[in-house]
Structures are given as C-alpha cells and as structure tokens.
Amino acid sequence: MRLVLGSASPRRLELLGQIGVVPDAVRPADIDETPLKAELPLIYARRMAANKARAVTLAKDGIVLCADTVVAVGRRILGKPYNATQAIDFLNLLSGRRHRVITAIAVKTGGRLLEKQVTTMVKFKYLSDAELSAYIRSGEWQGKAGGYAIQGIAAAFIPWINGSYSNVVGLPLAETAGLLTGANYPLDFELEAP
C-alpha cells in the first residue's frame, strides 16, 4: 500500500517518522481554508481534514493521510498569523489563559474516509512585554497555528497541558496510528537509522 501525506507540514512528517511511518509521497491538498461564517473550531477542523483528503487523488492501492490543526480560544479560531502584528494579537490573547488545540485527522482509502478528532488543553503563562518581543523577533511564530510552536521556544511559556503533546505539535500519534491500522496500513514501528 502506498501512503500519501496530504500535508506540507515538516512537523507532521517528523512526527510520523517517530512511529516508523515514512510516506511514499507528500502531496499537499490545494483547497480553500477559509472558515465559514460562525463556524465552530471543531467543525472547521473536521471539514478541512476531510476536504483535504477528498482533494488528493490516489492510485487504487493508495491511502492518503490529511490533518488540520487549529488553536481555539472559545469559539474563535486562531490560524497562522499573516504578520507579526497579528502574531502579537494572538499571543496577547493566549497570555495567562487556557486554550484548546484541536486536530482533525482524515484517512482516505478506496471509498472509505476514516476520521478522528483530538483536543488538548494548553495553558500559557502571562507573557511579559520582553518575552513577547523576543518571541516575535525569533520568527518562530511564522506558519504556526495560534502563532506558537510548543516544540520550540514557546515551550518556556507553557506550564501545563492536558492531553496529547503530539497533537499540539500537529498530529496526535496514537489516534493517527489507530486510523492507519483501521485502513489496513501496516505499522511495524521500525525506525530508520540516524
């Protein structure tokens, strides 16, 4: 079976490698990712993951794995910031409070679409102006949902999570492995030598 990762995220590729999964191809889906008016974060993430999976064409023996991760404060979806000003707004909103990181996963094989959603609660400490300024200068916020990366410098801002760490990075591995197994993709957990 040929596995296609329908994502351009290097983090998702690295996470899959942690469980010995090496896709045969990486083909990001090209879809409109604009949230619908008043769309709730979980519904949005599910719609995006499913639409991405449907958009990737497959060979007869193919499997495609797609995911969408959103950072949510209440009903508000914090996507990838367009610029430093928006990243500052996002980080100020997250400062000193809890938020949800939701990842929806979709695995398409044959005529089946297998789906799963995972939510992790994340608490940010209060960010000082100096911390916020230094983080923005680091550039790490670029291309990250909510404007931060838990696997990087932002780990210093997060004293507590409840749920899957790999979900916050971008792909909940236990649930992803379960979906791949459900699609009859063989997992042997053999890691490539460094």
Image (cartoon, rainbow, N blue to C red):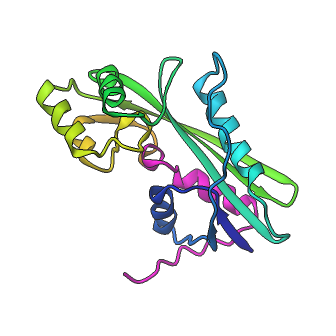
User: Magenta stretch containing residue 174, yes or no?
Assistant: yes
Q: How many marks?
A: 0
**Which residue is nearer to you in this view: 79 or 95?**
79
**Which residue is nearer to you in this view: 59 or 99?**
59
**Which residue is nearer to you in this view: 164 or 10?**
10
Residue that appears at 48% across and 48% down: 170
From this viewpoint, which residue is outermost toward the left? 130
Give the image location of residue 80, x and y in percent.
45, 37
Question: In screen coordinates, is 45 left or right of 97?
Answer: right
The N terminus lies in quadrant: bottom right
Give the image location of residue 186, x and y in percent.
68, 72
Give the image location of residue 161, x and y in percent.
36, 36
Residue 194 position (above or below residue 54): below
Residue 166 position (above or below residue 133): below
Quarter assignment of residue 95: top left
User: Magenta stretch containing residue 144, yes or no?
Assistant: no
Residue that appears at 62% across and 56% down: 28
Residue that appears at 73% across and 43% down: 51
Quarter assignment of residue 144: top left
Give the residues drawn in magenta, as a range. Answer: 166-194
Residue that appears at 43% across and 43% down: 168
The C terminus lies in quadrant: bottom left
Give the image location of residue 115, x and y in percent.
71, 45
